[in-house]
Amino acid sequence: MVEENAPARAMFLVVSGEFLRQKNIHGDQFGISVLEPGDTSGLLEFLNVGFHVSSIVAGRSSVVLEMDPGEFEDFLKSLNLDVSVVMRGLCTDYVADLLSCVPLLLDLELAVLKKIAKNFSMVRYEKKQKLFECSQLATEFVVVMNGTTKASTGGANEGDPQIVGLYSSGDWMNEDAIRQKRNYPVDLTAVSDNCMALVCNTEGFERMLELGGGVLANSMQRVVSGRLAQAMGKCSVFAGLSALTSKFAEFMHFDEVPSGTTICNQFGKVDGFYIVLSGELDMLVDSIGGVELARPHCKKKLKVRGRGGAGETGEGSKRSA
């Protein structure tokens, strides 16, 4: 009945039968809710973003009443209902439906998702518009729900920006940056039309962690370990050792390393194992006349060149560009 990304020009009131609301997440169709008689669809998309964020498939003997949003508002007033209260309820239910298909939140009960949904807003972004920049303090947890965005590092002072990933429906980012009170790890820019994200501020993110409890904490750890195992699988040291990388990833973490930071010294204590996910590292050796010094006081160092040498490059299910 309604295709995802189609222009939202009207709203629908279900009269009889059932309708399945679906959302495309990384090429798979997720059934996120069932619309029954009395349920509505299309109003929030019409008012907030201008296109349908999800598709709706009609079942047998299903009938809808197509209405102009203005007519629906008059209808509510005729019933002596507070329009703002009804709208808040519709928004909460719809955002909860969308959050239910985000991989990070799959294990949460719908009742919990409805409480979490109250902290999120639907925000539309025009093509080439930045959702956030790495020069800013991270204050928003972002879940991309429609369209495609690109994450990049670097800028005018460090050469051409380096694209480090593409993010689309179901991908999220910034949980580490918010918790550690750091800047956004990347610049995130909309690269397609009909780009929409669910956004909550720091307070809303902390509330989400509180409401999600141990279930959400375990989900976050599982996703991070999977992301690390995937990155480690690309390292020649772990080639063909998928079982080992999954286990080893549980003991590793992402870390953002500012440009110019010395990672380790030749005669320093070995305190870590590093896998470079983005950026570059320079190996520097003290020398005289271009000849390396082979004396004990010679300090060989690994130094970050460019932004994000071993750093966090955004959360969610990132795919290399």
Image (cartoon, rainbow, N blue to C red):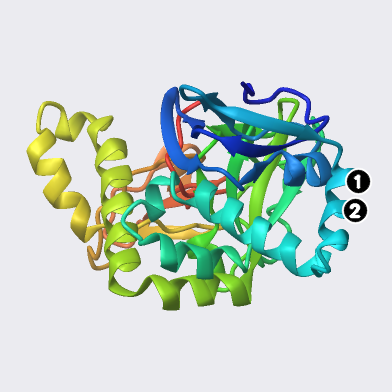
- The residue at the point 9 percent across, 42 percent down is 244
| Residue found 71% across the figure and 28% down from its top | 191
Residue at image mark 1: 70
Residue 168 horizontal/vertical position (percent): 56, 34
Task: Name the one closer to the observer, 178 or 147.
Answer: 147
Along the viewing direction, whichever of 300 and 72 lies nearer the viewer = 72
x, y percentage for residue 114? 51, 64
Q: What residue type is disc 2 on?
A: Asp
Point out the frontmost of discs 1 and 2: 2
Compared across the picture, whether 229 is left or right of 115 comes to left
Question: Where is 228 relative to 128, above or below?
Answer: below
For label 2, the residue is 74
For this rendering, which residue is in front, 21 or 64?
64
Alpha carbons under labels 1 and 2: distance apart? 6 Å
Write the residue at 27% across / 63% down. 218
Percent x, y of residue 223: 32, 50
> Marks 1 and 2: CB-CB under 8 Å?
yes
Q: Quadrant of residue 192?
A: top right
